[in-house]
Image (cartoon, rainbow, N blue to C red):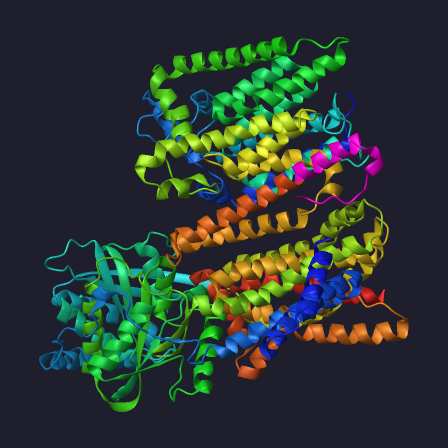
């Protein structure tokens, strides 16, 4: 009724307009035209269920994906990104004079000589494995240096095993009590013996020692230390004999080479894509650039000329690291404990010496020292595209949400479609409700599979007690999984088409419901994930995008078979193991390394990227394949 | 008595599933016990442990202001072995309570009260699930399992309510009122169910006798049984604690005045955090009045289906109670399958269930961002509790719509299947 009235009214307005002026006339005309067209379009849509329930959701979902991707590509533009700024006024970066100069350099050289002598000694005595041989001597030396500087010193031994490979070592640490402090808060300065790239961090360690003396204050090592600091360490890690207050921030120094450096590379990604407060990064950039005149790099972009391409490249590198969620340096271990941390790596050939790095760190520590409370003012969710430009969560989140939303749109459309097509009886949902319980049943094999999957993982964990380096089997297992992923959907599809052997074969409508629920769960998980780890959600969302559009193909056999086989082949190209192999092939990293790293991440860092892959991506993918495969039976 | 094999299978599977969960993930119960979605100040097992510790050492359990649950739970739990050293007996005790609740639910379902009452007979009687299926919906509901593993004391309130209803539908009004008295004694709010439950008992009695008994007299009788049972339980509590006013203010005062604003899935905590203190009393009154007002409205409008009033009220409580948890939602979801015949008339089930699923995934994620990661804030979690309440409210409104539509179709059989428009 309402529509009709509106129509009549708009017609009247059209007739009544013997126009006094042409512009007014035009205005009225366009208005009435839309008034006529819009209801007409809606009525058309209502009368055309094919369009409403089949085409429109496809178009909408496709649009969501396209807009999501384009959105991300727009982010590097000036209009969408912002200049970084220091939000916490208490930080006052670079406002103090750094006193770390002159005479401290002599001390630096002295410490370095002593350590070098020790390493040389270790090499002479044990040519096989000089580092292991000299570990006790080195840690003794370091403790004695720290002790001589007047610090409380303690050591902590730790041991981790993951995928059959053992990791052990010792942490040496000292605590400086501030002369006028109450020891309730602390700042951590870390120098790992080996850098994240496995190079000897001689200058870094020496610098930390010198700074420790001046202030009067390793990858697994940091994790062991921080876990023990919060009393959450595994049995293989010793508890800490000395502790200080709540940790406010942490800085890691990695200076593994001898020559002078050109710029500072700031690494900030944490485990599971957690990021430190943007203020910490900004302070480091401001101090390095403003006070010391040292340039700052990020995400290994050594040459960044602030073009669109470079900005996008930086964002994408950051997203890859965030999405994979591995620890990019010793600082990553601090992140899960809500301690903001960064790693400073000097890079390039230049004229900055270790003293400049020392002054930077001094200034940074003094800025953090100004804080009255934990860093909280600035952003925790951001994508950096340059050392002074970023986009915040409000701007970038919609792109991942749109991609996750496309699955939900399709799920809702499929649900409505099952209700619409059943028939004209009033008890429409009765038809669709019986399949509901069945579809749950049907997706059960998938969940069961996931459980067995994790059980397989579990047994590998148990086996590592036998000290077998399981990494030997990683590559083979990956290839086996590729084969399993090709065969399994076909078997499941055949079983389903025969009604699992216990009931009637399921009807086409139930296939729609299976797809609806699978996509609903996928959209649900991805949108939740987007709030925790944007990049991972975005990547998995893109890889799952084909699942929205696949469906059970109907028609004569000669058409059905080639299409479904082609579709299955294409889907297998985006299955989790194939993607892993593809990415490894593209980047030239062996599969074994990636999986060993993943196992290590699971065992030591508490990384859950793999859980998302096996519990979100793989089940959704499997159900998609089963749907497509069922068109062959 | 013939053993129903299907029922035994369902109950056994539910028991084994719970046992497997605690064996495979021994840290799961403690994790769930700490979750704000499951444990509220009035049903937390951790707080019960604190009260128990004080009680077994002859101190008043309400000293320290942590424990706010009914005193009769203390002697009960002091019989169980220490949960730190030997958690399995306590867990199994909770499993059994769950099974007993499921049994009561099956009884309610088998009575057929939900489709055929004294004044109402549903149009789609044949579309219904049997008792075992309804019990299965309850036992395998993840919310029920989470509540059970978290050892929340809400399960006893749930038993009280389910037993009250199951006794009422089988015409045993004395036991029904005693069970309701037990539930009200434990958590106060079930007392609001008195009117519909008394109506249910009255209908059952009227159906059996040729001549309908006097309404006022019957209500009075039931009311006095309820008061007597509550008075008896309170008397026992005084024997245990010794100090009547202390335990009254620590338990019922705590329910009524809502001093603890720990986050939960409900709507009260955030509202009262934000409120200026001078308005607190006024809004406490308003919130309670709002909660209680549903009793009158629903009872009058749905007089013909007293069991449906109880179901809907439980849904209302799950949304608007001062300290709701997912156990309240699980109780509502337990009774909802009794109305399988209304599902064809409901219009927004998919959206309501999607909203509930979204909020149950996003809730823990946002809570993590707020409390652990430090990168979110209270508004994140509060927004999700709003979505959760919205989902429940949609489901509630939709089911009430369906029930009214069903009544309307009964009154106008010739117009069955016609489109309706809401104005």
Q: Is residue A114 left or right of residue B77?
A: left
Q: Residue A222: x, y in percent?
A: 33, 65
Quadrant of the drawing holding the C terminus of chain B: top right
Q: Is residue A181 left or right of residue A527?
A: left
Q: Is residue A506 left or right of residue B373?
A: right
Residue A37, picture quadrant: bottom right
Q: Residue A627: x, y in percent?
A: 76, 63
**Residue extent of the magenta highlight:** B399-423
- Which of A109 and A157 lies nearest the eye of the viewer? A109
Residue A117, picture quadrant: bottom left
Q: Residue A532: x, y in percent?
A: 47, 61
- Which of B53 and B325 lies nearest the eye of the viewer? B325
Q: Is residue B407 magenta?
A: yes
Task: Identify the residue at horizontal 32%, vertical 67% (top origin).
Answer: A341
Q: Is residue B249 magenta?
A: no
Residue A145, picture quadrant: bottom left
Q: Residue A320: x, y in percent?
A: 49, 74
């Amino acid at each position: 009724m309402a529509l009709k009235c509106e129509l009549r009214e708009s017609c009247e307005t059209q007739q009544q307009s013997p126009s006094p002026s042409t512009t007014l006339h035009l205005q009225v005309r366009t208005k009435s035209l839309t008034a006529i067209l819009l209801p007409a379009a809606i009525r058309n849509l209502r009368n055309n269920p094919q369009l409403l329930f089949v085409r429109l959701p496809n178009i909408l979902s496709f649009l969501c994906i396209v807009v999501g991707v384009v959105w991300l590509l727009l982010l590097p533009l000036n209009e969408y990104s912002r200049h970084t700024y220091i939000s916490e006024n208490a930080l006052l970066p670079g406002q103090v004079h750094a006193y770390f100069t002159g005479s401290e350099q002599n001390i630096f050289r002295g410490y370095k000589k002593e350590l070098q002598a020790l390493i040389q000694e270790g090499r002479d005595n044990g040519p096989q494995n000089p580092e292991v041989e000299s570990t006790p001597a080195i840690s003794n030396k370091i403790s004695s240096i720290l002790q001589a500087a007047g610090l409380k010193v303690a050591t902590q031994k730790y041991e981790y095993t993951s995928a059959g490979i053992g990791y052990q070592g010792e942490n040496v640490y000292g605590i400086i009590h501030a002369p006028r402090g109450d020891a309730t808060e602390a700042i951590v300065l870390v120098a790992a013996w080996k850098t994240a790239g496995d190079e000897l961090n001689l200058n870094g360690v020496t610098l930390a020692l010198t700074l420790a003396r001046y202030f009067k204050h390793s990858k697994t090592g940091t994790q062991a230390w921080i876990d023990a600091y919060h009393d959450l360490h595994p049995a293989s890690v010793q508890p800490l004999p000395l502790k200080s207050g709540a940790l406010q921030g942490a800085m890691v120094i990695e200076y593994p080479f001898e020559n002078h450096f050109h710029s500072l590379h700031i690494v900030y990604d944490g485990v599971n894509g957690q990021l430190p407060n943007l203020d910490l990064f900004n302070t480091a950039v401001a101090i390095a650039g403003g006070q010391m005149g040292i340039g700052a790099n990020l995400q290994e972009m050594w040459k960044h000329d602030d073009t669109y391409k470079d900005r996008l490249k930086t964002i994408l590198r950051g997203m890859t690291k965030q999405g994979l969620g591995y620890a990019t340096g010793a600082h990553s271990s601090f992140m899960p404990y809500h301690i903001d941390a960064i790693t400073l790596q000097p890079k390039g050939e230049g004229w900055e010496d270790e003293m400049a790095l020392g002054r930077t760190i001094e200034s940074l520590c003094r800025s953090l020292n100004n804080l009255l409370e934990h860093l909280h003012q600035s952003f925790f969710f951001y994508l950096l595209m340059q050392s002074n430009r970023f986009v915040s969560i409000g701007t970038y989140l919609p792109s991942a949400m749109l991609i996750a939303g496309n699955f939900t749109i399709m799920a809702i459309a499929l649900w409505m479609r099952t209700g619409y097509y059943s028939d004209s009886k009033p008890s429409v949902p009765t038809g669709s409700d019986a399949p509901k319980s069945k579809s749950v049943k049907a997706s059960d094999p998938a969940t069961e599979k996931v459980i067995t999957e994790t059980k397989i993982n579990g047994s590998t964990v148990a086996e590592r007690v036998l000290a077998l380096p399981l990494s030997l089997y990683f590559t083979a297992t990956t290839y086996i999984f590729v084969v399993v992923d090709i065969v399994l959907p076909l078997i499941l599809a055949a079983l389903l088409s025969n009604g699992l052997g216990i009931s009637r074969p399921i009807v086409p409508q139930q296939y729609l419901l299976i797809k609806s629920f699978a996509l609903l769960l996928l959209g649900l998980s991805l949108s939740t994930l987007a709030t925790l780890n944007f990049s991972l959600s975005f990547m998995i969302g893109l890889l799952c995008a084909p699942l929205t559009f696949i469906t059970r193909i109907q028609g004569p056999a000669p058409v059905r078979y080639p299409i479904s086989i082609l579709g299955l082949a294409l889907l297998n190209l985006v299955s989790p193991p194939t993607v892993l192999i593809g990415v490894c092939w593209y980047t030239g990293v062996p599969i074994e390394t990636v999986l060993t790293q993943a196992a290590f991440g699971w065992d030591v860092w508490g990384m859950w990227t793999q859980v998302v892959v096996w519990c979100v991506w793989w089940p959704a993918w499997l159900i998609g394949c089963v749907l497509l495969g069922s068109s062959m039976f | 008595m013939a053993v129903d094999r299907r029922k035994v299978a369902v109950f056994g599977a539910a028991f084994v599933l719970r046992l497997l969960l605690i064996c495979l993930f021994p840290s799961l119960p403690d994790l769930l016990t700490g979750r704000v979605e499951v444990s509220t100040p009035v049903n937390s097992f951790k707080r019960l442990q604190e009260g128990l510790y004080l009680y077994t050492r002859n101190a008043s359990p309400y000293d320290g202001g942590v424990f706010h649950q009914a005193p009769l739970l203390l002697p009960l739990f002091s019989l169980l072995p220490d949960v730190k050293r030997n958690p399995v007996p306590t867990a199994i005790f909770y499993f059994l309570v769950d099974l007993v609740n499921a049994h009561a639910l099956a009884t309610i379902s088998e009575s057929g009260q939900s489709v055929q009452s004294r004044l109402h007979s549903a149009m789609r009687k044949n579309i219904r699930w049997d008792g075992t299926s309804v019990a299965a919906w309850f036992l395998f509901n993840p919310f029920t399992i989470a509540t059970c593993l978290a050892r929340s004391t809400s399960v006893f309130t749930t038993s009280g309510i389910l037993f009250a209803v199951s006794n009422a539908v089988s015409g045993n009004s004395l036991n029904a009122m005693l069970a309701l008295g037990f539930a009200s004694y434990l958590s106060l709010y079930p007392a609001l169910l008195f009117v519909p439950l008394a109506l249910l008992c009255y209908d059952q009695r009227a159906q059996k006798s040729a001549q309908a008994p006097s309404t006022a007299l019957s209500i009075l009788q039931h009311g006095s049984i309820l008061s007597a049972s509550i008075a008896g339980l309170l008397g026992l509590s005084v024997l245990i604690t010794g100090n009547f006013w202390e335990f009254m203010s620590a338990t019922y005062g705590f329910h009524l005045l809502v001093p603890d604003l720990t986050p939960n899935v409900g709507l009260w905590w955030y509202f009262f955090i934000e409120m200026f203190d001078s308005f607190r009393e006024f809004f406490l009154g308003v919130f309670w009045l709002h909660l209680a007002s549903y009793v009158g409205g629903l009872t009058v409008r749905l007089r013909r289906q007293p069991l449906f009033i109880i179901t809907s009220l439980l849904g209302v409580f799950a949304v608007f109670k001062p300290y709701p948890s997912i156990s309240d939602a699980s109780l509502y979801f337990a009774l909802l399958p009794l109305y399988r015949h209304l599902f064809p008339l409901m219009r927004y089930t998919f959206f309501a269930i999607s909203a509930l699923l979204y909020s149950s995934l996003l809730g823990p994620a946002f809570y993590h961002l707020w409390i652990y990661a430090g990168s979110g804030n209270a508004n994140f979690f509060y927004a999700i509790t709003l979505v959760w309440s919205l989902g429940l409210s949609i489901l509630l409104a939709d089911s009430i719509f369906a029930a009214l539509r069903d009544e309307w179709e009964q009154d106008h059989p010739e117009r069955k299947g016609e489109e309706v428009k809401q104005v």
